[in-house]
Amino acid sequence: MFVEDDEEVSPAIEFCLQKEGYAVLVVRNEEDALNNLRSEGIPIKLILLNQHMHSDEALLAGRRIRAGAELDPSVPLVVLPFEYEAAMEGTDQSVGDNDYKTYIADTDQLTSLIKRLIPINKQD
């Protein structure tokens, strides 16, 4: 699940992830995420969250989505911080058991992290 409030950004990241073999459900915010998960019963293997808010607030929103949709706590949460220091660019930071902040320099970094968290089985 990709939670993205910028309609200009979501198609690029969605395309990048689909190209790697991932199915992507794009929603606009926490409320949309919860509504979709509760009504559709879609199996979610990862929450990717890119919202225009402080990264700690985004992390909490992602945790609320995971808990509110009664997803397994092992489902990874990846937050793309909206603002950060230049020195952080290109790094990934573990901020909990299955929670990460990635300060992406490019989409290759993002897909590399996601592949580590939820490998694609090419035989499916």
Image: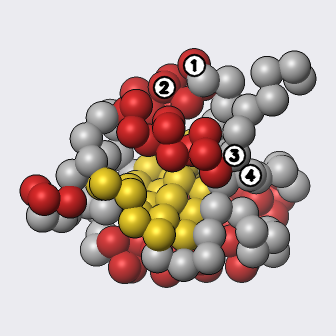
User: Mark 3 and 4 residues: CB-CB less than 8 Å, in contact?
Assistant: yes
| Of callouts 1 and 4, the N-terminal one | 1
Q: Nearer the viewer, residue 59 or 118?
A: 118
C-alpha distance separating marks 3 and 4: 7 Å
Which residue is the site of mark 2? 16
Disc 2 marks a residue whose amino acid type is: Cys
Mark number, residue 118: 3
**SS of the residue at dot 1?**
helix
Q: Residues within 10 Å of mark 2 (few under 14, many from 20)?
A: some
Residue 107: x and y in percent read 38, 33
User: Mark 1 and 2 residues: CB-CB less than 8 Å, in contact?
Assistant: yes
Disc 4 marks a residue whose amino acid type is: Lys
Which residue is the site of mark 1? 19
Which residue is the site of mark 4? 45
Q: Is residue 109 above or below residue 66?
A: above
Q: Residues within 10 Å of mark 1 (few under 14, many from 20)?
A: few
C-alpha distance separating marks 3 and 2: 15 Å
